[in-house]
Image (cartoon, rainbow, N blue to C red):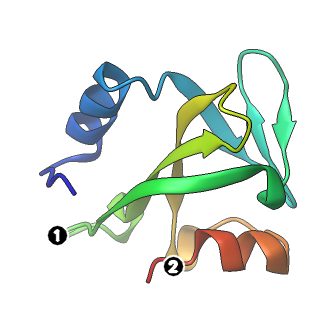
Amino acid sequence: MHSYETVSESLTELKLRGFTTDFNLAFDNIKCSDTGVCLLPSQFEIVEHYRFEGNTDPADEAVVYAIASKDDSMKGVLVSAYGAYSEQISDDMIKMLSVK
């Protein structure tokens, strides 16, 4: 797995590697910001993930997920805050996005 210093560096490199769709986290799915297409946890897999911890500001804490749909129709990224700034999501999404 690659190593990145910043969120923006990881997003730039992942885009060059074909992860071009921008996903947003919804309660029980992820949604493509451009097309509105939604994927349930059973419809995608996390290919890679990168965790970033803010040195001085907890708002800088985030995880970048490289995601591919199981039918190979989409590859993209999801940036999610964690800790106090995380969003409310379903149990299935929590299991899917747990960083091990």
- The count of marks equals 2
Q: Position of residue 55 (x, y in %)?
A: 17, 69
**Looking at the picture, which amino acid does disc 2 mark?**
Gly
Q: Answer yes or no: do the residues labelled 1 and 2 have beta carbons within 8 Å?
A: no
| Marks 1 and 2, the one that precedes in the sequence | 1
Amino acid type of disc 1? Answer: Asn
- Seen in the picture, residue 21 relative to 38 is either above or below; the reply is above
Left or right: residue 12 compared with residue 72: left
* Residue occupied by mark 1: 55
Q: Nearer the viewer, residue 1 or 3?
A: 1
Please state, as top left, top right, bottom left or bottom right, where the N terminus lies in the image. Answer: bottom left
Q: Is residue 73 left or right of residue 89?
A: left
Image spot of residue 42 (x, y percent) = 82, 59
Residue labelled with disc 2 = 83
The kind of secondary structure element at disc 1 is loop
Residue 9 image position (x, y, % from top left): 20, 36
Secondary element under disc 2, as helix, strand or loop, is helix
Dot 2 alpha-carbon crowd within 10 angstroms: few under 14, some 14 to 19, many 20 or more: few
Q: Up-down: is 25 above or below 94?
A: above
Q: Residues within 10 Å of mark 1 (few under 14, many from 20)?
A: few
Q: Residue at x 47, y 77 (%)?
A: 99
Q: Is residue 35 left or right of residue 59?
A: right
Q: Quadrant of residue 70?
A: top right
Can you give x and y, in whole percent of width and height, for residue 43 in the image? Answer: 79, 50
Nearer to the camera, 93 or 45: 45
Q: Residue at x 84, y 24 (%)?
A: 36
